[in-house]
Image: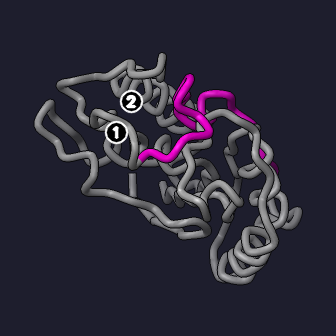
Amino acid sequence: MKLYLVRHGQTDWNLKRIAQGQTDIPLNATGIKQAEALRDKLQDYQLDICYCSPLVRAAKTAEIAVNDRCPIIFDNNLRERSFGKLEGTPAAEWPEDILDLRLNSRLGNCETMQATLDRAKLVLDRIKTEQPATAHVLVVGHGSLLKNLHYNIVGYTLDTDFHGFHIHNGEIIEYDI
């Protein structure tokens, strides 16, 4: 199975480096252009199905990028990691590393790393169950959730440096699973 992970287009909060989490922030003009550029790039890809977060920034990215080429399935498990009370604040100002799996922080009532990893695994298991081994699957989501999906694909331990993987707005990362 081919799996293509795509992070939604840019939002004003991305531009300001403010944590969005599950706050439903729309694409800005650059984000719409990124989604249109993604649509052009994906013309060379076979796509059978798209799984997408229902948050508006991801949904709009998928709608533009897929351009009616395949069905879009919205999955609540693809929503961004909840950052609780930290949503709307700059991550650079947080007093602890919420990407540290050993710490498994709940700072500001955020969703723990383990809970996010578990939710990402549910998405991966769903895709593997619902789609044939020959499928070409597009997944449109969010930075932190896609990071956790990536580590469910490639593997992780308590010592994994979760800062080691980053996906940019509008970027495509391809996997054979």
Outermost residue toward the left? 159
Label 1, label 2: how many angstroms apart (C-alpha)?
Answer: 7 Å
Q: Is residue 73 magenta?
A: yes
For image coordinates 52% across by 31% down, the residue present is: 86
User: Is residue 73 at least partly visible in the picture?
Assistant: no
Mark 2 is surrounded, within 10 Å at the Cα level, by few (under 14), some (14 to 19) or many (20 or more) other residues, namely many
Image position of 45 with respect to 149: above or below: below
Q: Nearer the viewer, mark 1 or mark 2?
A: 2
Q: Is residue 161 magenta?
A: no
Q: Where's residue 35, x and y in %?
A: 74, 70
Amino acid type, mark 1: Asn
**Which one is earlier in the sequence, the residue at label 1 or at label 2?**
2
Amino acid type, mark 2: Leu
Colour scheme of this structure image?
A: one colour
Q: Where's residue 168, x and y in %?
A: 50, 66
| Label 1 with label 2: CB-CB less than 8 Å | yes
Residue indicated by mark 1: 152
Q: In the shown orientation, is residue 97 left or right of residue 43?
A: left
Q: In the shown orientation, is residue 10 left or right of residue 124?
A: right
The magenta stretch is: 71-91
User: Is residue 34 at least partly visible in the picture?
Assistant: yes
Image position of 102 with respect to 67: above or below: above
Residue indicated by mark 2: 117
